[in-house]
Image (spheres, rainbow, N blue to C red):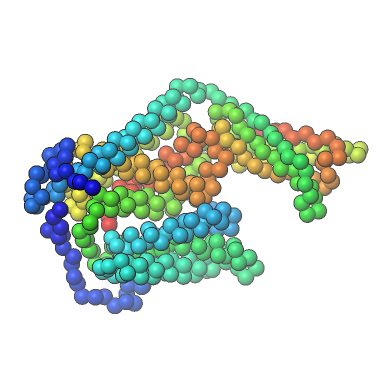
Amino acid sequence: MNRGAERSTKAAAPEHPATSIARAFGGALVFSLPVFMTMEMWELGFYMDRARLILLVLLNIPILVFLSHYSGFEATFDWRDDLRDAAIAYGVGIISSATVLSIFGLLAPGMSVGEIAGKVALQSVPASIGALLARTQLGGRHRRREREDRYGGELMLMAAGALFLSLNVAPTEEMILISYKMSPVQGIALVLGSIIVMHGFVFAAAFKGGSELSPHTPWWSAFMRFTMVGYVIALLISAFALWTFGRMDGQGVSTLLMAMIVLGFPAALGAAAARLIL
Amino acid sequence: MSRPEGEGDAGSPSPERQHPARGPHRGEWLLGLVSAALVCALLGYLGYEALTARDGVPVFVVETQAPRPAGEQFLVPVTVRNEGRRTAAAVEIEGRFEGGGESVVSTVTLDYVPARGEVDAGLLFPQNPGKGTLTVRVLGYANP
């Protein structure tokens, strides 16, 4: 294992904490405004299965810690810093969700506590991920470092990217409507299309560097170890997102697979792009 | 876990080399093969569906449960199953109660009933539908 060779941590002057927090709020808004303005997300806040909501809310914590490890809004060096950054991001996510939902008139005094809590909890998941992503995407210092288990780390990163993008679209009715409109032949086309687009991103990431792949890696090696595995991860994440939002309930096998494939398209894009962007 | 250097591809034999750090782990290839097999299985299933499920129509089976009081009315839980290979949208369900010299009709519309899937719904009646005859049927649907 050779570490720290070409991309060492860039230690810049520490930035003012208020700037970090402001950037986190900005990220929460930029990355989750689409879901703030999605009707299904408000409705899911009060009718979705509570056990699944709790699972999603809890699962978000390790995801945030992991993302913070990759791209937190403070240059973190140990897991305690990552935990703290994740907690701040979650807090920013909750505050921005509550604020935006109140301004939109979606939280009113007459509502039950369960409804308000459900709406805020659900929206805070994409908002908190957005708060963490703000670091790399809104002009924060770009930082990369060597990781111990790079392959496992890259798969985790793909899963996080897939989850973020699928959370953005999975709640909408359009996901299942598209799957109902598609024929099996169109399903095959979408699977192949997702894989091709994904491999394009994998290929691009190999040239960008920072990945375990390099331009010298043969295409079939990258295809099997990253594109194929990444696509299956995207499908599993989309299945999880569909299940979380109750879109799987009462579905038959074919309609279920088709919904996974439809949501798998944005999930695959998210998975592949995460390696390129972060 | 052992990490054989240069396993199965043009990886570097020496760990000191600057560029591609090491050959891929054997587990990475195994994961890749399993994933490829899953994707092939998915494509195979879709291909089979494409060849067999040509012009299916929705086939509805309606199951009702015993009426139970719900507030001031009576609830009849209904499960609509679609045994066909085609998904139906805007599925209209009608429950007709006849008893005690009067007839009451309650309806509900289901957004979707997926192919080979099922949807739970409920019909409400002002009087106990157990004391008479209740017929529940599907009135019609639209293609999604």
Which residue shows up at 56% across the image and 32% down it?
A: B116
Which residue shows up at 8% across the image and 52% down it?
A: B16
Residue A233 pos. (x, y %): 36, 44
Residue A138 pos. (x, y %): 30, 65
Which residue shows up at 37% across the image and 61% down it?
A: A64
Residue A237 pos. (x, y %): 41, 47
Q: How many marks?
A: 0
Residue furthest toward the front? Answer: B1
Figure check: A49 above or below B39: below
Residue furthest toward the right? Answer: B101
Q: Nearer the viewer, residue B74 or A29?
A: B74
Would residue A6 be visible to someone looking at this image?
no
Q: Nearer the viewer, residue B42 or A272?
A: B42
Figure check: B132 above or below A58: above
B103 vs A246, left or right, is: right
Residue A249 pos. (x, y %): 56, 43
A116 vs A147, left or right, is: right
Quadrant holding the C terminus of chain A: bottom left
Which residue shows up at 55% across the image and 28% down it?
A: B85
A19 vs A242, left or right, is: left
Would residue B38 be visible to someone looking at this image?
yes
